[in-house]
Amino acid sequence: MTLDGIERAIIHAITCTWHHPVLGGVFRVLQSDAVAIPLFLLATSLVARRDGHRAARTVLTGAAAFGVGMLIATLLWATIPRERPPHAYERWLRSESELATCASHPEAFPVRDRVSTRRSFPSRHGITVGAFVTALVLASWRLGLLAIPYGLLVAVGRVYVGRHWPTDVLAGIVIGTTLSLVAWRLAPRFLTWPPPWPGRSAKPAQPS
């Protein structure tokens, strides 16, 4: 099977097997910046209660990876002419009655959101997930256990609502994760000033 065939099979499995009238709305809410950014800041504030310097490192890592990731996405969108999934199908399923029969029509695309005419590769949401989830995992494995499932829901949701091919999302996650790992290593060089966030700081090392 070709890559295109594999991607179409994945899209069909996700968008049809999980079909429910309200699921698209749930995924769109989870993908919203109005939800994702406050959740990240809330998680970072929990880190700040224990270690202000680590919290600052987490924010700097996420912000740097996100910013560079958006620049990379813009450059790739300008050079890779990949259309959004709906445009690759000759037939669309739109009404609720049509969507309910999605499993019987692998040749058709279930449209649950506005059909975008912008480029598709890579997914900016995938980059965001990779950048911020990785930053939280590096900051605290406990927060990571909560952040990873949320990130997976956002990633799957981009496919479910028809905005991206699976490889768009996967590429975005790889880009965001890689940038976050690099930023985490470099962040301490930029945190000598201003001082760390207020919070319970680590105790100074005792002289030997």
Image: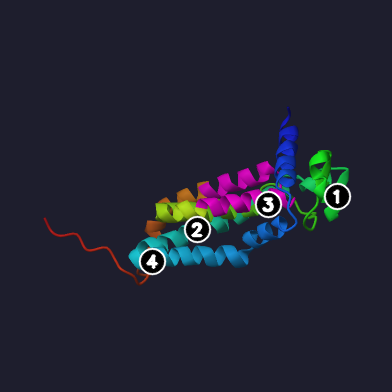
Please state the horizontal and vertical placement of residue 25, each as a whole percent of the image. 71, 60
**Residue 161 lies in the magenta stretch:** yes
Mark 4 highlights which residue? 48
Screen quadrant of the N terminus? top right
Q: Earlier in the sequence, mark 4 or mark 2?
A: 4
Q: Earlier in the sequence, mark 4 or mark 1?
A: 4
The answer to which of marks 1 and 3 sits earlier in the sequence is 1
Q: Position of residue 65 (x, y in %)?
A: 52, 55
Count neighbours of disc 3 (C-alpha within 10 A) and say few if under 14, some if 14 to 19, many if 20 or more: many
Is residue 43 found inside the magenta-colored segment of the image? no
Identify the residue at horizontal 52%, vertical 48% (top origin).
177
- Looking at the image, is mark 3 or mark 4 earlier in the sequence? 4
Residue neighbourhood size for the residue with mark 2, other residues' Cα within 10 Å, grouped as few (<14), some (14–19), many (≥20): many
Left of 83 or right of it: where is 40?
left
Q: Quadrant of residue 47?
A: bottom left
Amino acid bearing label 4: Ala
Report how far apart the C-alphas of labels 3 and 2 lie in the structure: 21 Å
Viewer-side residue, 52 vs 99: 99
Quarter of the rendering occupied by the C terminus: bottom left
Do tag 1 and tag 3 residues touch (Cβ < 8 Å)? no
Q: Which range of residues does the magenta coloring cover?
A: 148-177
Q: Secondary structure at mark 1?
A: helix
Which residue ends up furthest to the bottom in the rendered image?
Answer: 198
Tag 2 residue: 62
Q: Which residue is mark 1?
A: 98
